[in-house]
Image (tube, grey):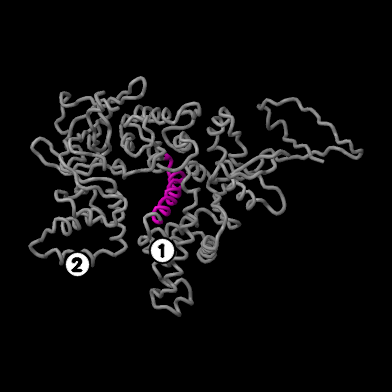
Amino acid sequence: MSPDTVVMADSMSNIPLEKFEYEPLSEIASAFRLLRLFQETASYEALSYAWGDPTSSHKIVLNDCEFYITANLYLALKNLRYGEGERFLWVDAICINQACLPEKTKQVSQMRNIYQAAERVLVWLGNACPETEAAMSWVHSQLEKHGEDLDLLQGVVNLYMECWPESGQELADDSFPSQTPEVQDRRFQRLRGFTILLSQPWWSRIWVVQEVVVNRNVNIVCGRSVVPWGPFMAIVKGLHHSAPLLQATPNERDVFGRSILREISRRNYHAYFVPPTMSDLLSHHRGLQASDLRDHVYALLDISSDMSTSTFVPDYSRSAEEVFRRLVKKDVEEHRDLNIICASEPSATLNTTLPSWVPDWSSPWKHFCLTQFPFDVCDEIPAHASFSSDMSILKATGITLAIISSTSAPLEPSDPVFTAWLQTAQEWRTIVEEDEFDTFFCTQFRRVFEMIVVESESEEDGPAEEIRKVKEGVSSTRLLSFENFMGRICTNRRLACLKRDDEVLEGLVPIDAIAGDRIVVLFGCTVPVVLRGGMGGMGGWRFVGDAYVNGYMYGKAVEGLTNDDAEEFAIR
């Protein structure tokens, strides 16, 4: 006996309905029908998960029919199922007909509303193991001790990881701070548990950005353990700024940094009236994974301030290349700036059909994009740009700033020490000379360069004395942070000598830049760019990447500019 389901008609007056038809009763003499009344609006939870390997599937029973889902989703449903009672979930792989492109297109436009209206969002991080169980248990214990004061949780965790006593037993047994091998090992084991959690495929998926941003009630689920998102991420941030993580491998640091980007996206979305722009979202979440390349754009539309699924309609009949081109055109026309093309890294993309000025959002960052700094090389001159009818050529107006005469060896991702790389650059002075960047990192960069690379000596003190003063004035943790920060900016770049008339300039250019490439200021772009002429006899220019030119990042290049100075660059 299967009860019929009834939703009150007055709540669905605008929805076209088919006329109800009875199904025959069973042949059993005692058979009869029952009526099940649901609330007008059913409460549900939305599942956020990584699909996993599509070739590894499990069979479930769906509406009395067999249905196949991925192994990761199968594990999630097994762990989320209540022992008794029903649980209402929205799961994209089941609730959307993935084989029907028109339905998929319509549902993608509803994703924000679906996750926003859910009672809560459940983030599935896979089955538990001893390390992750210990990490989730530690989150619970910190909540019991300190409550949900997120700043307090972050600070306390950071102190624990710096080896201050975590318990009365540690305080009694260990010196203060706690530095015994047993205590240190306990810290690193805890770090290991969180590293496993943050290394799960979920964190690398593009759709999860929107799924956890739009709903305030998000839970982290691993196996049978459930913890609130806010306290979990406060603890992750405390671990992220601790000395043990600074001493970890780059990959381990990266998984923590990547997870914190999700928290920053949530905080910004709820804290500010205007969400980030589409180009900012694309830059921040570049290289995340999607089973469909078009989703690198579609997944972020409805949490941006300047685009949406109504102004840039998802259309799965278009190719990914067409979507990426159309997005650049719309962004340039909307904002009259060209910063979005600086996200293009032509040598890093696997898609050889894209013009050099179109970013491949499915490709991870090869180097740090300099538009993230508040430079203004063109002094707010708006973009003068147009596109060919086939979207293969971008025509942009600008001026030539300099020609690359020589470059240093690049800083490769595998190079262990940033300052050691600096010693190979004979002509380089600083990439952060302007007063606007007179922060800890930039001040120390200048001083470290002068002492280690140039080996300059002041009249008062020699290099050894200067180095001693720097080390005394700055903690080892901050110096490690400085090293990591500057290494991130310079990785996959070269230091360059540039020729501008009779002036020799210094700059930071992409790894693929070569002698003879041109440094150009395009109107509407806040940083200089590197262009290469020729294009195999077709004429025009190829975009190589963005650049830093010492002393020219705040409008000096366009001082006294006349109309005759500008030229048009046809970039293919």
The N terminus: image quadrant: top right
Q: Pointer 1: what residue? A: 158
Who's the residue at 50% across and 29% down the image? 316
Where residue 254 appears, x then y in whole percent?
Answer: 39, 53
Q: Pointer 2: what residue? A: 468
Among the two numbered marks 2 and 1 on one chain, the one whose residue lies closer to the N terminus: 1
Query: Can you see residue 435?
Result: no
Where residue 338 appears, x then y in whole percent?
Answer: 30, 32
272 inside magenta stretch: yes
| Disc 2 packing (10 Å; few <14; some 14–19; many ≥20) | few
- Seen in the image, is 496 located left or right of residue 33? left
Residue range (magenta)? 252-275
- Seen in the image, is 16 located left or right of residue 161? right
What's the CA distance linking mark 2 and mark 1?
Answer: 27 Å
Residue type beneath disc 1? Asn
**Dot 2: element:** helix
